[in-house]
Image: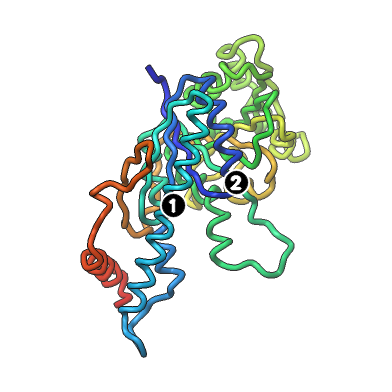
Amino acid sequence: MFTHSYLLALDGSKESHAAATVAWKLTQAQNAKLVALSVVDSQAIWDLLGFGTPGFIGSGAYFAAYETILTALRTVSETLLTSFESRSENQAINTECLITEGNLLRQIFEQSKQHNLVIVGHRNTHTSSAILDQHSLIRTSLSKRLAGICPCPLLIVPSDKAWTKARLVFSNESFSPDALAQFLTFTDPLELEREVFCVGPEENIAKLVQKVKSLVPHSVKVLCLDAAEDEPFASAVDVTANTLLVVTTIQSIEGRETCAGTRIHDFLTSIPSVTVLVLPPGAATEVTEVEKVVKVGKAVKVGKAVKVGKAEKRSSNRTVEKFRAVLSNLNVI
């Protein structure tokens, strides 16, 4: 009987492969169910085609191109999940594979509601190159955008380097007993050296430190970094790649932020080589970014053969009709 359910968002990158390796280890250590998700980003196809009001050649060529690309991406997803499932079976790990279609961020967000943890590879978007195409920027910043809206804990994995330590960082504003319990439950079977860092003004944090000490095992180190320190939060998150960094968050009118008030996107950009577990705010928050995304997509469970089921097979006419309706709603046609 599984005690947890983990969602692994897969693509063909090396960072995604690293995330899969970490997911396999966690699944075995924590008796969790693992669901691998591959998203056929049909919204990105429209963005790529740049289809607008019919001009010289009308809409037929664009719809034909859309169908060709969509079919190719479905094949890629099937191949990807076939390989993943085969490697999972070699390690005696029981997995479920899922293909969905629609906007990439929306699909992962919707699926995440059914799981205890989302695992995703991470490639930092910061680059010194003066040339960076828009599509690359969108793809590589997925984990950062997801960190701002994910309703459950999000594990962002840049590499499969083994952890020897785990560090939880929180402030008086972001602390909750649930966050502390999540940290202890998640790390307990991993047999890591654990520590908890409390950051904030000394007059506010002292009582919290004592409370935390009363709630954690004696083997967990509890430390305080107050305002007298230079950049206390920066010191708390200054870790090496062998440390799992667990960060609590708060919700502001500007969006989701770290416990120190740093935008989660900016924070993740500053530590590209560290695996980070982002805990969502303790209180339920309204998701704004994801509600702006067009709802176009469906989910199809994939068996061992990773074949597209009957529900997946539709006529070109029905597809054209559906996406004409979508484009009409977007005022594109």
* Horizontal and vertical percent position of residue 65: 38, 72
Q: Secondary structure at mark 1?
A: helix
Residue 288 seen by the camera = no
- Position of residue 211 relative to residue 176, above or below, is above
Q: Quadrant of the C terminus?
A: bottom left
- Nearer to us in this view, 193 or 263: 193
53 sits to left or right of 196: left
| Location of residue 171 by image quarter | top right
Colouring scheme, one of rainbow, by chain, secondary structure, one colour: rainbow
* Horizontal and vertical percent position of residue 260: 62, 40
* Horizontal and vertical percent position of residue 245: 64, 32
Q: What's the distance in space between the residues labelled 1 and 2, CA to CA?
A: 14 Å
Q: Name which residue type carries label 1.
A: Leu
- Nearer to us in this view, 128 or 319: 319
Packing grade of label 1 (10 A; few <14, some 14-19, many >=20) is: many
- The dot on residue 122 is 2
43 sits to left or right of 190: left
Q: Secondary structure at mark 2?
A: loop
273 sits to left or right of 316: right
Q: Name which residue type carries label 2.
A: His
- Position of residue 318 relative to residue 181, above or below, is below
Q: Which residue is tagged 1?
A: 105
The residue lying at 63 percent from left, 16 percent from top is 191
- Nearer to us in this view, 240 or 261: 240
Q: Earlier in the sequence, mark 1 or mark 2?
A: 1
* Horizontal and vertical percent position of residue 143: 54, 47
The residue lying at 34 percent from left, 72 percent from top is 64
The residue lying at 70 percent from left, 23 percent from top is 164
